[in-house]
Each structure stands twice: as structure tokens, then as C-alpha cells.
Image (cartoon, rainbow, N blue to C red):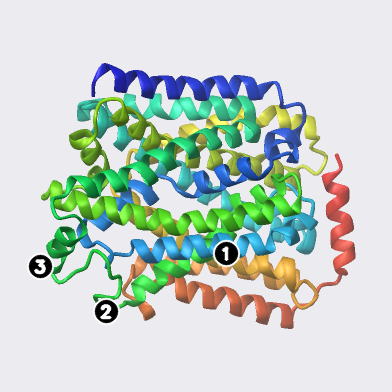
Amino acid sequence: MRALDWIIVLAYLAGLIVVGIFAKGKVQTMDDFILGGKRFGKLALIGTIVATMVGSGMTMGAVGTAYNSGATSTVPWMYFGFATGLIVMGLIAPKVRETNTRSLAEMINLKYGKVARVSIAIIVTFYAIAMVAINIAGLRTVIINCFGLPENSIVIVTIVAAAIAIAYTSLGGMYAVVWTDVIQFLIMFLGVFIFAPFFALSQVDGGVAAIESTFQAEGLSFTNPFAVSVTSGMIAMMLSYFFCSPGDPTMPQRALAARDSKSAKFSFIVSGGIGYWMGIALIIIGGATRVLLPGIESGNSVLPQFILNYFPIGLRGLVIAGIIAAVMSSFDSFLILGTTHVMYDIGRVINPGLKDKTIQKALPIMTIVFGIIGIIIALGITSLFDFLYMVFSVLAPATFPSMFAALFFRKQTSSFGVSASIILGFLVTAIIYLTKGYDVWLGDPLFLGMIISLAALILGSLLVKDKKTPEQFEAEARAGADK
């Protein structure tokens, strides 16, 4: 990298800290830290929705996968599921906002009580830590590949890179996260998803036809995702990302942080449309790089190597900043998510007398703790894409059925049924992953986990009825929230 590239990247990173310092003045209450005061309009929401969902695994990991298999990889399925899930989230966003809660766990508490709340809060905390670690590992990979730093500096690089996101998130909470997400979305979208794919195609002699020939020589395709047999693994990939778009706990939080229901609905639907293009863009980059730079062994290095070898000075710095943006914009959101569920959801159940002011003061400290834990875990992650897929698939059976039950089937379901669905959906899927991997029925533990989760929800609700009415559950939850 040349001096101008360094200046662009460093200016971008410094700008994030400035936003965090500015946002600190906006945080006066716990709601300001967790939801940014519920004042975000369409631009802010689109920026934070897309930036949150598209982290390191869905950029560098996806480009590496497309590099190896083109359109016949799992990338089209992943992005189709992700984008469609965001559109569904847009359709249900008004229902989410009607709950007037602060988190997915509190939404479940409103409908089913404390046991269900703690169950899902613990799982969401695990998910948040895992996603923080994935994105720290992705940030480390970007810096090492793009800045030419030696491998023995890996610990220092990881700590320094993560510290920036931890700093502005702990300073400004959700307000800082959303507005840094907007900045990061613009840089990421223009650099990685608009300029990079068209520039990549322009560098390949023969364009699309030449790339297609390269993949066809190996029995694959650059343009046709159906050129090879569709496997249960591909379908599972699509379903896991579909389920985890509305089921991802950061997404209800975005809907709750919106200025109004119309803004939330519009923003999720537009974000879904943007998601379809993103998948195509990454396939183009991966396919073009396969022709330009054959023989790259690490999938995580494909995108950085393409940028370093082909982008002109200045633009190179901008696009590298875009990759960093894709990682950091996801990282900061999961810091907030985990912090919220530990301090607010689990903390308030353990100590019902916990005041909002006390939680507000503890949230920045817990954000730093989460970041440190994420750094430690990140040092052991080797494959961003595989780890991301596993975490997403384990989450879906726990969150998707319970959230939809809370929003649409409260009278037909019980607290016992939902709690059993959350716990068994998570545990069964995780145990199958750890013991069998993908050597199961239909090729992915997600299917069995979702079936078990739904069966537990239905049978548990039929066998064990609530002693309290839904109105009593809600009254107790509202009383506990008003501290």
C-alpha cells in the first residue's frame, strides 16, 4: 500500500472514533444506549441493517467461496436466503414495533415470562460473542493481507483493530453504531459492491465469457447456479440465512429503533433488494479473481489479494476501507446486542430491582468485556465462512419459531412450549453439529433442529397450559420494565 492508501484508511478509522465521541453526548438514558432513542429514519435504518448483516464471513468468506466454485457455490443460496429474510422482516416489522420493547428477549418476556426470556437471552449472548469473534478474526485477516504485516504480529493487530470498534461502541451505544454503520455502508457499498465487480470484469480479457470458460473446464459455472445438482446443503444454506435474517436478534432491535413503523418496513424491504445485488457482486469479484490470480489457497485472502494487485492508488485505500467497514459495522452491532442481553435481559431477571440508571452505567463496561472475550476467541478461528454458517444454523431453530409464535400465535402457544422450543432447538442443533457435522438427514443439522424446535413448541403448548393469561404475562413484564 502507498501513502495515499494509508491516509484514506487511517482517516476512515479516525472518523469512526470522532462519531463515537459525538454520539456520547446523545446518550442520556438506557434507551439511548440500547436503541438510540428510537429516532432513526430510512437512510439510517437501511445503512445499519445492511451493514450489520454483511460482515466478514459474507464478504471475504463469500468471495473466497465464489472464487472456488462461481455461481455453483453456496453464495447465491446464502444471499437469496438472507435478502428474502430481510423482506419478510420488513413485512413483520410493524408487529415487532407494537410490542414497544427493547430487545428480542424482552419481546419474548412480554408474551411468555421470565424463563423464556432468560433462555433466549443466554442463547443470544452466545451468538453475539461468536459473531464478535468472527468479525474480529475477519478484521485481523484484512489487515494482515492488505497491510503486509507479518504473522507474528497477529495478536497486536487483532487487539488494535478491535479496540477502535470497541471504543466508539462503548462511547456512543446504538446511536454511534447506527451512524457509523451508515458511513460504513456507503463506503462498503460503493467500494466493494459497486466499483469492485465492474472493475474486476474490466480487468479480464474476454469478460464474462472468459470467466465462464474457466469454471466450465472444471464442471462448474460462473453464471448458472443450477449448472450442478442442487444439494440439500445448498437448500440448508438458503434456509439458515432466511431464518436468521428475521430471527437474528439485531434485526428486531433495528425495527424497534426506527422512528416509526413505515420507516422500519420500507427500510427492511429496500435492504432485502440490495442484498440480492450484493450476492451477484461478490460472485463477479470471486470469478474474475479466479482468472486473474489463479492458485490462491486461502479463500479469506481472495478479495484482499485482488484489491492489492489490481486497484489503483487511492481507490485501493477506499476499497480496503470498505472491507474494513463491512467487518466493523457487523462487529459493533453484536457488541451492543450481547451487552444488552446480558445487562438488561439477564441482569433484570436476576435482580428485578435493577434500575435503568445502573444498567446504563454498566453497559459501556460490559461492551469492553465482550470485546475482550471476542478477541480471545477470534485467535482460534481459521475459516470465517464455515464458522459463520455453523453459528447461523444453530441460532435459527432457537429464535425463529419463538419470535413468530410471540407475534402471531400467542393464544395458541404456552410459556412452557416456547421455552422448550428455544432450549431444544438450540441444544439439539448444536449437539448434532458437534457429533455428526453434516452427515445427517438432508445434509444439515438445521433441518432436524428446526423440526425439534417446532415439535417442542406445538407439543409443549398442548401438554402444558399457562396458568396466567397473556394479559397477566404482559402486565408483569411491563411492570418490570418500568424501573
State the image coordinates of residue 141 (x, y, percent, origin top left): 30, 37
Side of 477 relative to 389 (left or right): right
In primary-sequence order, the first of circles 3 and 1 is: 3
What amino acid type is highlighted by mark number 3?
Ala
Residue 299 can be seen, yes or no:
yes
Q: Residue at x 73, y 66 (%)?
A: 407
Q: CA distance from mark 2 to mark 3?
A: 17 Å
User: Which residue carries the number 2 mark?
Assistant: 229
Secondary structure under tag 3 reads: loop
User: Which residue carries the number 3 mark?
Assistant: 217
Q: Quarter-wise, where is residue 323 in the image?
A: top left
Secondary structure under tag 2 reads: loop
User: Which residue carries the number 1 mark?
Assistant: 398
The one nearer the camera, 193 or 387, is: 193
Side of 349 relative to 236 (left or right): right
Q: CA distance from mark 3 to mark 1?
A: 42 Å
Residue 296 can be seen, yes or no:
no
State the image coordinates of residue 42 (x, y, percent, origin top left): 65, 45
Q: CA distance from mark 1 to mark 2?
A: 30 Å
Q: Residue at x 55, y 42 (%)?
A: 47
What amino acid type is highlighted by mark number 1?
Ala
Q: Residues within 10 Å of mark 2 (few under 14, many from 20)?
A: few
Q: Residue at x 46, y 75 (%)?
A: 447
What amino acid type is highlighted by mark number 2?
Ser
Q: Residue at x 71, y 49 (%)?
A: 256
In primary-sequence order, the first of circles 1 and 2 is: 2
Quarter of the image with the N terminus is: top left
From the viewer's perspective, is the residue at label 2 or at label 3 nearer? 3
Q: Quarter-wise, where is residue 303 in the image?
A: top left
Side of 265 relative to 214 (left or right): right
